[in-house]
Structures are given as C-alpha cells and as structure tokens.
Amino acid sequence: MTGEEAIAYIHAHGWETRAPGLGRIRELLRRLGDPQWALKFIHVAGTNGKGSVCACLASVLEAAGYRVGLNTSPHLERFHERIRVNGEEISDEALGAAVERVRSAAGDMPEHPTEFELITAAAFLHFLERRCDAVVLETGLGGALDASNVIETPELAVLTAMGMDHTAILGPTLRDVASAKAGIIKPGGTVVSRGGCPEADEVFRRTCRERGAALTKLDLTRLTVRRLDLEGASFDFAPWEGLTLPLAGAYQAENAALALTALEALGEKGWSIPEEAVRRGLAAVRWPGRFEVLERDPVFLLDGAHNAHGMRAAAESLRTLFPGRKLTFLLGILADKDAGEMLDLLAPLAERVLVLRPDSPRAMDPAALCVLLAERGVEARPCASVETGLEAALAAAGEDGVICALGSLYLCGEVRSAWFKTH
C-alpha cells in the first residue's frame, strides 16, 4: 500500500455515523497484538493549547536523549504531520506498511473502525516499530471516548486550558466538557492541569479523588514573562530563569509553563530531564500555524484560533504585540463554532475582514459571516479563494500594516500552503 492509498483508505471511514465508544479500537488493537502495551504515554487533553504543549514536551524529551513519538491532530498541510518520531514525519513507506496491517486486521470486524481509530492504530504500530521511549499523545475529541483513551494508565495525563467546544458531542456545559476530558485520568495516575476554569477544576479534582490519581495544578505565580515580540518569548519559571521560546503568542509562555510542570512530574517519576535539555528543547520548539510569523513587511501572522477560547487568546496576543493598531484579517469559521462570540472578540481589532470558506463541509457561508461582521460595524467582503484573499489582504494592508489569518485550523493550513507556494 502506498502512502496515498493509505490516506485514501483512512479518509473513507468517517466517524459521523458511528456511535462513540472504545470497543472498535480495542478490538482492532487486540488483532494487531496490542502495541500500546509496549509504549509509555504522556496523554494530553483540553480545549486549547494541546498541540503547543505536546510540541514543548516532545522537544524537551528529545533534547534529553529520548526517542519520542508525537501523535497530534488535525494536520495543517500534510497528513504525515500527525505521526512523528523525534520531529520526523512518518514516511510514505512506513505509513503504507502500518495502514496495510491495520486494514488487514480491520477487514472482517463486525463494525469497521473509524478514521481516527485507524490513525491511532497506525500511529501505535509506527511508534513501536521505531522503538519510542515515550509517546506524546494528543486526544482527538474529548477524552473519555476518544480513540486515544484506549491506553491504560499513562506515565502522565496533562489537561490544558478549558473552554466550550464540540458541545454537540461533549455536552452543553463546561462541566460536561470537563467530564469528557477527565476521561483520560486513570486509576493511580499522575495528572497535571492548567487550571483557571473553576467548573472544570472541580471536575478534575473530584475525578482524581475517585480514581486515586495525584493532581498537580500549574502555579502561574512562578511565571514571569520578560520579553514578548515576534521572535517569541523570554521568561522565567521559578527556579528556571532566562528560558526562551520561539513562539510569538502571548499565551505560549503559559503553555510552556504547563509543559514544564509536566516535565517536573516526569522527573519525580525517574525520567532524566536535565536543565540543559529543558533550555535546548524549549528553544527548539516549532509549532506551525500557532501565531506563526509568515512575513514581516507587512507583518503577516497565522493562528489556529478556531473557537471562542482560542479567539480570546489570539486577541490578547494581538493587543499585546500591536497596541492601538487596527488589523486586516483573513477569516474563515466552521458553522458549528460560536461565531457570534468569536466575532465580538475580533471586531474591535479589525480595520477590515476578508472572508474565506475553509475546506470543510462544516464551513460557515462567507456571505452569512460578512453579514454578522457588518452588524458589528466591520468592513467585510467574501473572497472566492485563498489566493484571492491573500492578494487582497496584502494590497489593503500595505507595507506598514498587520495581517492575521485565523478562525479555523483547516483555513490555517490552506493559507500556509498558498503563502509558501507564492512567496
């Protein structure tokens, strides 16, 4: 099976018509010899910041000398981004070989596994084949019934920033969402939480008590940001001083602090993570599409803010980096997101908005989005393509302007691909 054939096979098995549950993935992995039993996991769930925290953890562990698997979703530009070992994306050959084994095992199952279940199984096979010392494993959606939750008690469970998202699936309240995320807390486990959301924090504390898990909450009083600009951040996280992170978002120092708290917990469990590895690992972090600087004349930023919680963080970063400035935005939103709240956060910063349709069947109609922006006093117009939107944004912003593309991870990937094809 080629890499292209593997991806086509995976995408042919959507999850929308399947009941949530771990039965399929358990059976699939059983037929594959349960590769997950031979791997050690750091399991990461949350509403926002999961990918950035995973990237920080993987980079530092690699700098400490470990062979590290990283499984994240969705991808921005290329499917292979989802499965990496020490930063190296899975090859076409390895992807084809892993998915061929998965297809053979899944062929006569009474209920065929879903897309994400197939990816999870293929990733585990690849990480075992590459003899990974640790796997940083991001949940796809929720936690309790997410395919990644097929693992037993991980080395560490990490809960990132919490907010409202995927409410149609996870439930209408923050407690519902938090309860789904808390599903990654296993009996006797070690848990690190971002905190800061009282309703979610109470759910996590109660779940840890019930399951005999040890809970550590991020202590933000230890964090002092010394510098934040388009190059990234310099910060202290006591007792560490003078740490650097090449990620520009104002929220990224907090994500790094959560990763550091998680690394401390791993150190207490016997993992060897020297200070020098922490410094080198954080300084080497790369996480495209999260407040990524694509250009400086004019400034062109790309951010994966795809829900109200993410939009709030992006807006705070933009105010910090460009105080008093009005920006040109490229925007695309999925219809199942809280567009109203997202636009309320964006509107005060917008000089104009060029609206695009993300490459997703769930994309919100650009004309409808323009109407909502006009109601908030923002000049907005739809663009027929990403390329058209890029040209219009560059022309409108001029050399001294600031452009920011955001609103959907799908759009983020499209804009990034189009930009590097033409610049």
Image: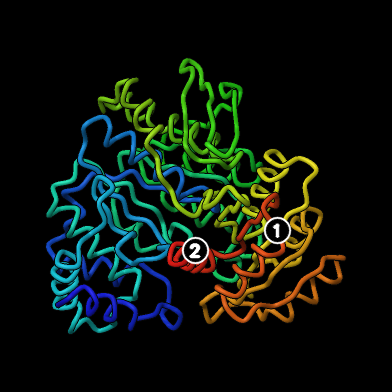
| Numbered circles on residues, count | 2
Q: Image point 75% across, 62% down: which residue?
A: 343
Look at 43% across and 30% down and name the residue there: 260
The residue that disc 1 covers is 397
Position of 306 with respect to 137 (left or right) is: right
Q: Secondary structure at mark 2?
A: helix
- In the rendering, at what x and y percent does residue 230 appear? 57, 39
Tag 1: amino acid: Ala
Quadrant in which the N terminus appears: bottom left
Residue 145 appearing in the image: no
Which residue occupies 33% across, 60% down?
Answer: 82
- The residue nearer to you, when weighing 27 against 236, is 236
Q: Is residue 256 above or below residue 397?
A: above
Q: Secondary structure at mark 1?
A: helix
Q: Residue furthest front?
A: 399
**Residue closer to the observer: 227 or 25:** 227
Which of the 4 quarters of the picture holds residue 168?
A: bottom right
The kind of residue on which mark 2 rests is Trp
Q: Disc 1 to disc 2, how far (Cα)?
A: 16 Å
- Residue 404: x %, y % from top left: 63, 56
Residue carrying label 2? 419
Q: Is residue 83 visible?
A: yes
Disc 1 crowd, CA 10 A, few/some/many (<14, 14-19, 20+): many
Check the image and report above or below for 369 versus 276.
below
Q: Nearer the viewer, residue 138 or 419?
A: 419
Q: Residues within 10 Å of mark 2 (few under 14, many from 20)?
A: some
Q: Is residue 407 left or right of residue 344?
A: left
Q: Nearer the viewer, residue 114 or 364?
A: 364
Badge 1 or badge 2: first in the primary sequence: 1
Residue 204 at x, y percent in the picture: 53, 43
Whole-percent x and y of residue 291? 55, 49
